[in-house]
Image: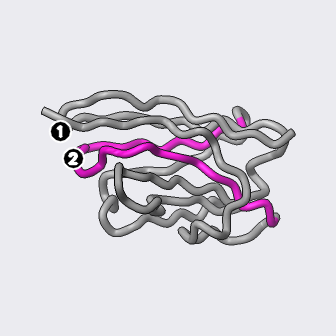
Amino acid sequence: QLQLVESGGGFVHPGGSLRLSCAASGFNLDYYSIGWFRQAPGKEREGVSCISPGDGRTYYTDSVKGRFTISRDNAKNTVYLQIDSLKPEDTAVYYCAVNTVQFRLCWLNIYDYDYWGQGTQVTVSS
């Protein structure tokens, strides 16, 4: 059964860092695009970053470029999101999701993703 489990969220002060993990089971994530999304209270879910299968091409939304880094460890079947220089506006529940079309380049279109994890809370506050 296909499953995604996020972890690594927490409370940090502005300027701090976290590394989020998205552990996959039931499929080989190297064949599929994986996206990270976030949803703040009262706001719509937005795309943050994604990584394509194969060559691992990455994509970031403008607001996180230079601060967030997505990566993939095929041996662990896990995708990571390193988030640095955190700001209060980064506070949200962070979700990972998979596009189950094999070898499709990733995009941050929420409707491209079929399976979602349960989310992990990131809170940035002084």
Q: Residue at x 31, y 52 (%)?
A: 67
Percent across and percent down for residue 13 are: 19, 32
Q: Residue 108 carries which label?
A: none
Percent across and percent down for residue 53 are: 71, 60
Q: Quadrant of residue 104?
A: bottom right
Q: Which mark is residue 87?
A: 2
Q: Quadrant of residue 83?
A: top left
Q: Residue at x 18, y 35 (%)?
A: 125
Q: Nearer the viewer, residue 101 or 41?
A: 41
Q: Which mark is residue 14?
A: 1
Question: For this view, does 93 lie left or right of residue 30?
Answer: left
Question: For this view, does 30 lie left or right of residue 1?
Answer: left
Please provide the residue range marked out in magenta: 77-101
Percent across and percent down for residue 18 are: 37, 34
Three-letter amino acid code at disc 2?
A: Lys
Three-letter amino acid code at disc 1?
A: Pro
Please say if 31 is above or below 87: below
Q: How crowded is mark 1: few (under 14 residues within 10 Å), some or many (20 or more)?
A: some
Task: Tell me the element at label 1.
Answer: loop
Marks 2 and 1 close (CB-CB < 8 Å): yes
Q: Which residue is drawn at 50% across and 50% down?
A: 70
Question: For this view, does 37 lie left or right of residue 92?
Answer: right
Quadrant in which the N terminus appears: top right
Task: Tell me the element at label 2.
Answer: loop
